[in-house]
Amino acid sequence: MLNSPEPTRGVISAEPEPIELDWSKSALLIIDMQRDFLEPGGFGETLGNDVSQLSRAVKPIGAVLTAARDAGMLVIHTREGHLPDLSDAPRAKIERGAPSLRIGDAGPMGRILIRGEAGHDIIPELYPLDSEIVIDKPGKGAFYATELGEVLERYGIENLLVCGVTTEVCVNTTVREANDRGYRCVVISDGCASYFPEFHAMGLKMIKAQGGIFGWVASSAAVLEAMTSSTTLGATS
Ligand code: C5J
């Protein structure tokens, strides 16, 4: 692929239809695989969620991450979280609901959803390499109040392979933001997860419905297959 003289294009068997991508204009975008969402004692659990629901996405993401690294594809990780003084955290976000701990409160992995705390960090299994880009975001969407747009422009990226958590919140919000900005998003179905399996299923369905109104959905196996057996079809995406 990128690291070889082979063609740099590949066709992913996706829904609602296959999509051909130029790998040199594609990036892997891993959304919020943080301890705060996946481990007990973090933000996700304070909201009353069963955090074990998210672990199923780790292996598929790991497989695609390894392939992307081997291929020299741009890899971007995001982390949802706030500055220690909470100046970037809307009161409406902090005050809502009745969580066991609120954003900024001290928890077993440090202050909940605060940058620099242990819980805010990415899980060890998917830890970014020094060479990879990490985007800190205060919102659910990865474009809002971040440098993501400039980074993608700088690297000439047109296509995003998107995975992470949670399917219906930060993954969906980011895909919608990306779609409006003209990016082709292929969402890796088993590389996403939700605390609510029915929201995961519906979140994917919303993306690929109506001819792919927000993007495409493909399994990690289909993405890996396309990455390892690139072909050219003459399409221009
Ligand atoms: C949530 C996220 N669910 N990363 N954040 O609050 O999806």
Image: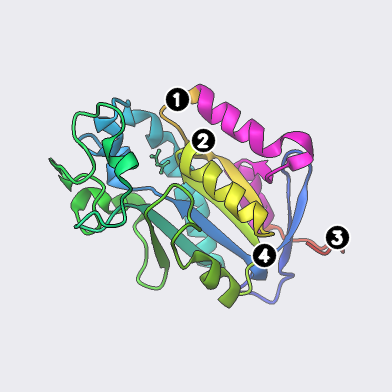
Which numbered dot is residue 233? 3
Does dot 4 land on a helix, a strand or a loop?
A: loop
Mark nearer the N terminus (1 vs 2) = 2
Amino acid, disc 3: Leu
Question: Is 200 displayed left or right of 180 in the figure?
Answer: left
Amino acid, disc 2: Glu
Q: Where does the image place residue 47, in percent across and percent down from the top left? A: 29, 29
Disc 4 and disc 1: Cα gap in Å? 31 Å
Ligand 1 is in which quadrant of the figure? top left
Q: Residue at x 50, y 65 (%)?
A: 148
Which numbered dot is residue 158? 4
Does dot 1 land on a helix, a strand or a loop?
A: loop
State the residue position of label 2. Answer: 168
State the residue position of label 1. Answer: 196
Amino acid, disc 1: Phe
Question: Is 148 displayed left or right of 52 in the figure?
Answer: right
